[in-house]
Image (cartoon, coloured by chain):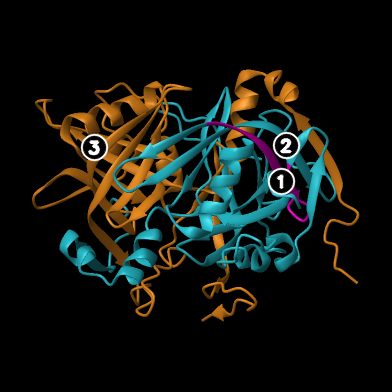
Chain colours: A cyan, B orange
Amino acid sequence: MKEDITINKLKKSFSKKDIDEMEQRYRAAFINSLSGFKSGNLIGTIDLENKSNQTNLAIFSSCFHLGASPALLGLVSRPDITARHTLENIIKNEVYTINHVNTQIFHKAHQTSARYPKSTCEFEATGLTPEYIDNFEAPFVRESNLKIGMRLKDIVHIKMNETKIIIGEINNIIINYNDSLPIDQNSGHINIEKLDSIAISGLDHYHSTKSLARLSYAKPGLTPKILK
Amino acid sequence: MKEDITINKLKKSFSKKDIDEMEQRYRAAFINSLSGFKSGNLIGTIDLENKSNQTNLAIFSSCFHLGASPALLGLVSRPDITARHTLENIIKNEVYTINHVNTQIFHKAHQTSARYPKSTCEFEATGLTPEYIDNFEAPFVRESNLKIGMRLKDIVHIKMNETKIIIGEINNIIINYNDSLPIDQNSGHINIEKLDSIAISGLDHYHSTKSLARLSYAKPGLTPKILK
């Protein structure tokens, strides 16, 4: 007998009309929950044209993998105020940093989404610490355990909703760890759970993770093995 | 005294040269780990030009939120064989489904990434069950607890690496739940952790989640509150 894991479940359906009729902020939270778990990253930028080298730090849940060779990451930038300072700085300077949010700093990371005036330094306002490396003019977040220096490669305009996809190439990576470096030396896999990285769902929900398994490369007719 | 959560941490840095010199498959796993946690979704499609209405089911870790109004989701399609059947069907039929992978089906979901010939039905091969609704010609996954019917709106070509971003608008949503519908009636937030959805990291690592907190809308000068 085939196992049926949907037995006794209740069901709720939403039509396009149901979605269209949702109040705007309700719909934003609802639709933002649908894609699944998201990455949580702090994007660090600097305005070098500003006399005081004004930095900016903003949380994004939209960083995604775009390719390994060249090593590309995408970021979705919505046409709103919070994201604009970040986008402006990236366009001007063409460098930025992507820093994993972890369980120790997610409150501070969330606070960067407040609509501060451009003159406010989110590092200072939230108690996070800017950190620099040689020959790279964008601030990393000291308290993050996985930090990526990025160089802008392209900005793709999504006509349908005035969204922009910022595409950058990885320039360098910094990993901070406690006991042993959580990189599988056979495969190259980085165990970001051991770096305490969090996942985001919806607009405001933060989650830690618990490993279920790594599964071996799938082949037709073979059941995937659990990798150690 | 300022709390310093990076005290006593070890540090490992990788330069662009280090990345360039990595062996190809090692680099793929390494770079795929960097963006942070990812969504895990099964994409259901059908080939209506095929006499037997051949279905296809493929796991994607690249579904991302693109906008709430209109309600848009993006999918990154790499230029490889596994993704191609899905992309071909989406281009032909302009409808597809996005189904959250959960802790009960992640082994089966992973198995859909095996390079089956096009004539193989991944539903049959992996033991997942196709499910249809009226007036929508793409198969949902019965065992998923959050299923989204999608209509193709645009395909964006990323010139840098021959990747395509499939952009679709949400047509309908089906949620299966046990006791109470996990939607916050005030905000619209869906608690996908209660739907047992998993997160993916890297190429092959599956994670369940544990809620840390939902945080209130951030405002300058105010500490975010924890929402119930």
User: Same chain, marks 2 and 3?
Assistant: no
On the same chain, marks 2 and 1? The answer is: yes
Which segment did they paint magenta?
Answer: A138-153
Mark 2 in CB contact with mark 1 (< 8 angstroms): yes
Left or right: residue A16 compared with residue B192? left
Residue B220: image location, x then y, percent: 61, 73
Count residues near mark 1 (Cα–Cα under 10 Å), then give few for <14, some for 14-19, many for 20+.
Answer: many
Q: Is residue A151 magenta?
A: yes
Q: Quadrant of residue A8?
A: bottom left
Q: Is residue B48 above or below residue B216?
A: above
Q: Nearer the viewer, residue B44 or A144?
A: A144
Which chain is indicated by disc 2? Answer: A
Q: Secondary structure at mark 2?
A: strand
Q: Amino acid at mark 1?
A: Leu
Q: What residue appears at the point 43 percent right and 43 percent down from the top-left corner?
A: A164
Q: Position of residue A112 (x, y in %)?
A: 62, 63
Residue A157 picture location, percent across and down:
39, 38
Q: Which residue is mark 3?
A: B45
Quarter of the image where the C terminus of chain A is located:
top right
- Identity, as a three-letter code, of the amino acid under mark 2: Ile
Q: Is residue A44 left or right of residue A76?
A: right
Q: Amino acid at mark 3?
A: Thr
User: Which residue is under mark 1?
Assistant: A146
On screen, residue A120 versus residue B156, left or right, reads right
Residue contact at pointers 1 and 3, CB within 8 angstroms: no
In this figure, which residue is indicated by the disc labeled 2?
A173
